[in-house]
Amino acid sequence: MPSDRTWSDVRNLTAYRKTQQVQAQIPQSLEVLVQATSWHRNADGKIELIADQSPIQKQKPLTCAAVPKN
């Protein structure tokens, strides 16, 4: 059925357009997540993830000192 009428949505959506001021939530503690390296089963039979002893593994800063000069 050909028609030259276009469809137009004329519903009132103002109830859904509630704008509130957005404020970023910054955590107070700087908790570091550590990737688990192994696991074991505890006395209750549940799996526990185990991480390395040192939670912060920093990479030494990269420099160009080892690059030979031509």
Image (cartoon, rainbow, N blue to C red):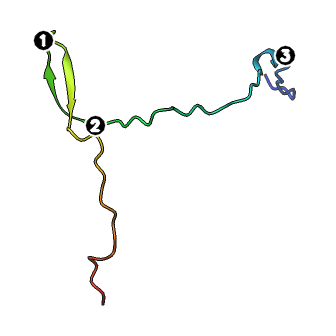
Q: Which residue is mark 2?
A: 35
Residue 54 rendering spot, x and y as whole percentages: 24, 41
Q: Which residue is mark 3?
A: 12
Q: How many marks on residues?
A: 3
Q: At 81% from the left edge and 26% from the top edge, which residue is drawn?
A: 2
- The residue nearer to you, when weighing 54 against 36, is 54
Helix, strand or loop for disc 1: loop
Q: Classify 53 as above or below 50.
A: below
Helix, strand or loop for disc 2: loop
Q: Residues within 10 Å of mark 3 (few under 14, many from 20)?
A: few
Residues at marks 1 and 3, CA–CA distance in whole angstroms: 59 Å
Q: Residues within 10 Å of mark 2 (few under 14, many from 20)?
A: few
Q: At 30% from the left edge and 77% from the top edge, which residue is drawn?
A: 65
Q: Classify 68 as above or below 5.
A: below
Report the amino acid beneath label 2. Answer: Gln
Residue 21 rendering spot, x and y as whole percentages: 73, 29
Question: Tag 1 or tag 2, which sits nearer the N-term?
Answer: 2
Question: Tag 2 or tag 3, which sits nearer the N-term?
Answer: 3
